[in-house]
Structures are given as C-alpha cells and as structure tokens.
C-alpha cells in the first residue's frame, strides 16, 4: 500500500470537504487530488520513474504540501528540506541524498545558484508559487496535464522519504522510511487519537518535521488541515477559535510562548481535543500551566526521526492522578514521563552488553516495529550501529516505572561523569526549568581538574526577567544534592539552536572544551 493511498482514502469519502485551508484560500479534497495528479503526470512525462528523489524547498505553504503529495503519487522519494537551514547546508543535503527534482518557493529562489553548484544531479527546478525567468512555475509546468493519474505499482518496502536527522550531535544522516513505515505511523496514530471527528488540524510547526507527518493520519480521515506559515503565538491563538481547531502540535518552546501571551486566558479553545507536544523535554511546571489554560487536552508523543512519535504516548487522561480528565493533576514524576509504550511497537531497556533489563532499571531505550526506519542512506556503518540485534538503539537513556510509564533520563552522550558519579543532565534541566524567570536551559559537563567533569548550566531567561547565577545554584541544591547541583551557572540571552528549535549542546560544549583532545 503506497502512502498516497492515505490521502486518496480521505478524498474518496469526502471529495468536497475542505482539505487545505488558510488565510485567503480553501481547497477541497477534489481540487487537491486533481492538482496532485497533474504534478504526478508532469513528473512521468519528464521521465521520472518511481525511486527518483524530489525535494520541496518551502516554508509552510498549501501548494508546497500539494507538491509533496504529487511526488508521492508518482512514486518519487520525498526529501524534506528545512527552509530554516543555512542554504549551504541544504545544498549539501540535496547532493548527499541524490536529489533529481526541486520544487522551490519563490522566497528561496536566490538559493538556486548555491544549490546548482553543490547538487549537480538536479535536472528539474519548478517554482511553486509564481512565474520566474529562471525556472518554470508549477502552473506552467503542469499545464495540459490530466487531472487523473494511472497508478504506478509501488512496493511496500519502497522508500517514501529520506529525512535528515537533526544534526544536534554532528553532520545529519539520511533516515530512509519505506511506504509501509508511513502507513504504519498513520494507522497507529489514527487509533490513538479518536475524539475529534471531523478533524481540524492546525499545521503551525514546520511541515518538514513532525507537523508534516501528522498530516497523513488527518488526510486518511478526510480531515481539514489549516496551514499557518509559522508558529507565531498570536496567529496560533487566533486560528484556534477561527477554524474551530480540534488538534494542534507544537514543540515545548513554542508552547511556552503561547503561555506567555497576555491574552491566552481569553481565547476560546473549547474546540480543542488534542494539544500534542513533543520533540524535546517539556518543563513539568509549564505543562501544569498548559493543563490549566487549555484544559485536559495535552497529549505527548515520544519518538525520533528514525521511529516517529509512536514509541510512547502520554494520553490526555494520563496527565491526571486517577485518569479522570480535569481531576487532580498527576504527580511530577508521571508528568515528566513520555507515556506508555504504544501497541504498535515493542520497547525495551537494554544494558551495554545487549541484555534487556527489568522494569525500573536504567539503560538505553530500544524499540522495534513497523515505524522503525530502513536505515541511513549510504551509511552502512551508522545503520549497523543503530539497528543492532533486531532493535533500533535510540541513544536515549531511560527506565520504565512500575506503572509502565517510560521515562527518558538523558541522551547517552549527555550523561556527565563527575567524580565517578553519573549525572543525567535532563534531571538537572527539569529542576532549573521550574524556577521563576527561566525560559530554557542546557546542562553540560565542563572540564574540571578535581572532578574530571563539573556540572554546568547555561540558562536563558524569560524576556524581561533578571536571573542570578548564585540564586539558581542555591535553589537547585535542596532538590538535587551536592553532586548533581551545577557548580557554575551562566546566563545567556539565547541558546544556540538547530533550525528545528533543538538546543545545540555541542556548540555550547565547544566553548568550554576547545583545544582538548577529548570532550569528556
């Protein structure tokens, strides 16, 4: 079953329902389907067979997402390119992933020279939204193409996409996802979220990442996707009541910005059934605030590019002590978890020797199931390292508590060894994130002549907040003890982040480990 069948299922049941909407536009399933067929026919006309690679270089845009559906219909492999990356980085990715066709929004036409010099395999470039002297427009390129497309045979194990890893620890790798991986993700996600029918999904986070994958279960159900150009806090809050949004995904940093809006309590969010969060740890205190503001709709998905979002799931009712939405809020340990493993995967905790550990023990989180990637593109050694003994090794350190909830303790590479003791930075970060005036923080190990590594926190204040390093250390000590409490704290106006918004700890570490032959 090819991934485009997810869209066609919704289009067949609800041809006149709104598929893609936003400021100034409304496109039915019938219209979007016809557009995807024209794109697929143009690709076939120009000689692109299933397995060719196509990228869409654009911010959140209805026409750009239609191009994604069109290339999938033709059997091409989608290369999601983050428009917030540096142009040089995207050019390297397009070359590394052997891109053949590039759909580009006019906003990024100036990047074409750098891309052409780096990614020589690209033979076709199409401007998504308008005419341009350099390349044909999408409308001109598809002119005369039929609104129906003769379906191609696409195997379940054929690639659907090659996505770049976040690159927070080094050069990104290409994660190969098969058609069946995307189908399994979409079908599994549809079984977890069932309270909203019809679905109105607000796509505010980048469609090149989790927000884009979440479109496919929506399309399968014939839901409506509201496309926002960016997760601007005011625009998100305005869109919820305007479109009667039923589900929304945002990473924690974007949720914090919503909560900081002075009018957040005045917004009618009664239509919202699921406010999904993930992609990074969320402050427990901020999560409690979100529950108070938005109601019993918060739901977390844990995953990674190699196994998206369905490794574990913290349901709305799990946020409450007795499983009763709107009742007493669960304790901090529960709220800091990422939920219980979903029925669509098997999750284990493994030691360094490859043995599965009993509940409660701390080790690496490993997973297997139909959502797990095929491997890393042209990187056999990294694939062999990640997919060992039939398991995907996530690189996350975790434990499963007696109630079955999965807790991420840290990333393996983020563990600090100080004076012979293991300190998991995530535990320290959670305490600091709960302090007044803190927007975000990163905890790392820095070189220390006595301890080998010393615990250091780099803290970003909320706008207008004044933080004191000594006060932060003093506040941490009663909760963390002497070993885990940061020895030093620095206040930075902002923290370095990837284009996806993840904190780049490697860049922070480099400032303290420069000139050393090892970083531990």
Image (cartoon, rainbow, N blue to C red):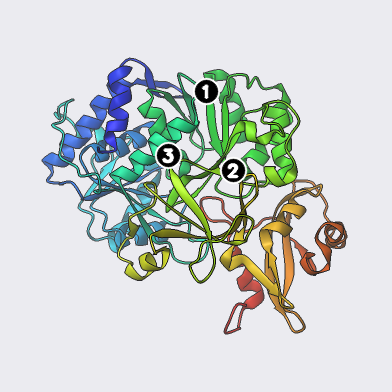
SS for callout 2 = loop
Residue drawn at point x = 27 percent, y = 35 percent: 4
SS for callout 3 = helix
SS for callout 1 = loop
Query: Upstream in the sequence, badge 1 or badge 3?
Result: 1
Apparent side of residue 291 relative to residue 413 in the rendered image (left or right): right
What is the total number of numbered labels drawn onto the structure image?
3
Quarter occupied by the C terminus: bottom right
Q: Which residue is mark 1?
A: 195
Q: Quadrant of residue 339?
A: top right
Q: Quadrant of residue 184?
A: top left
Label 1 crowding class (10 Å Cα cut-off): few <14, some 14-19, many 20+? Answer: few
Query: Upstream in the sequence, badge 3 or badge 2?
Result: 3
Vertical side of 133 occupied by 144: above or below: above
**Residue that sits furthest to the top in the current view:** 16
Cα–Cα span, label 1 and label 3: 21 Å
Residue drawn at point x = 72 percent, y = 37 percent: 330
Residue drawn at point x = 23 percent, y = 54 percent: 122
Apparent side of residue 335 relative to residue 28 in the rendered image (left or right): right
Cα–Cα span, label 3 and label 2: 22 Å
Q: Which residue is mark 2?
A: 339
Cα–Cα span, label 1 and label 2: 18 Å
Q: Is residue 492 visible?
A: no
**Residue 111 horizontal/vertical position (percent):** 37, 53
Q: Is residue 379 visible?
A: yes
Q: Which residue is mark 3?
A: 212
**Residue 314 horizontal/vertical position (percent):** 59, 39
Question: Is disc 1 in contact with disc 3, using a CB cutoff of under 8 Å?
Answer: no
Residue drawn at point x = 35 percent, y = 42 percent: 182
Q: Which one is closest to the eye, mark 1 or mark 3?
A: 1
Vertical side of 426 occupied by 353: above or below: below
């Amino acid at each position: 079953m090819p991934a485009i069948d997810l869209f066609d299922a919704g289009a067949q049941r609800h041809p006149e329902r709104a598929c893609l909407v936003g400021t100034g536009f409304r496109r039915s399933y019938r219209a979007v389907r016809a557009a995807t067929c024209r794109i697929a026919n143009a690709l076939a006309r120009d000689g692109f067979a299933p397995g060719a690679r196509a990228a869409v270089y654009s911010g959140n845009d209805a026409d750009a997402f239609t191009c994604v559906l069109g290339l999938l219909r033709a059997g091409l492999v989608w290369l999601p390119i983050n428009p917030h990356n540096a142009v040089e980085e995207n050019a390297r990715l397009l070359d590394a992933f052997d891109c053949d066709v590039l759909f580009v929004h006019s906003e990024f036409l100036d990047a074409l020279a750098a891309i052409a010099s780096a990614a020589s395999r690209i033979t076709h470039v199409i401007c998504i939204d308008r005419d341009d002297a350099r390349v044909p427009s999408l409308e001109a390129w598809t002119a005369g193409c039929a609104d129906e497309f003769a379906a191609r045979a696409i195997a379940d194990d054929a690639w659907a996409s090659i996505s770049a890893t976040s690159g927070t620890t080094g050069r990104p790798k290409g994660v190969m996802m098969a058609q069946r991986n995307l189908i399994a993700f979409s079908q599994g996600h549809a079984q977890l979220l069932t309270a909203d029918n019809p679905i109105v999904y607000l796509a505010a986070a980048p469609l090149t990442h989790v927000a884009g994958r979440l479109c496919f279960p929506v399309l399968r159900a014939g839901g409506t996707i509201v496309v926002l150009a960016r997760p601007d806090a005011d625009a998100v809050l305005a869109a919820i009541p305007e479109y009667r949004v039923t589900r929304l995904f945002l990473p924690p940093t974007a949720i914090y910005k919503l909560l900081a809006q002075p009018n957040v309590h005045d917004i009618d969010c009664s239509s919202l059934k699921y406010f999904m969060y993930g992609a990074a740890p969320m402050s427990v205190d901020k999560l409690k605030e979100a529950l108070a503001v938005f109601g019993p709709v918060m739901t977390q998905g844990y995953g990674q590019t190699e196994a998206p979002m369905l490794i574990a799931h913290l349901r709305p009712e799990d946020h409450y002590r007795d499983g009763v939405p709107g009742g007493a809020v669960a304790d901090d340990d529960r709220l800091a978890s990422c939920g219980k493993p979903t029925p669509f995967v098997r999750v284990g905790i493994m030691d360094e020797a490859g043995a599965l550990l009993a509940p409660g023990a701390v080790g690496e989180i490993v997973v297997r199931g139909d959502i797990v990637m095929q491997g890393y593109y042209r990187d056999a050694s990294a694939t062999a390292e990640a997919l060992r003994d039939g398991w995907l090794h996530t690189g996350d350190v975790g434990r499963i508590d007696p109630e079955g909830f999965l807790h991420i303790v840290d990333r393996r590479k983020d563990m600090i060894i100080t004076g012979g003791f293991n300190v998991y930075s995530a535990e320290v970060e959670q305490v600091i994130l709960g302090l007044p005036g803190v927007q975000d923080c990163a905890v790392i190990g820095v070189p220390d002549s006595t301890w080998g590594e010393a615990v250091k926190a780099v803290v970003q204040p909320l706008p207008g907040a004044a933080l004191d390093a000594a006060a932060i250390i003093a506040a941490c000590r009663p909760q963390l003890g002497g070993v885990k409490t940061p020895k030093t704290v620095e206040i930075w106006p902002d923290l370095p982040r990837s284009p996806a918004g993840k904190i780049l700890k490697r860049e922070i570490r480099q400032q303290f480990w420069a000139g050393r032959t090892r970083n531990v």
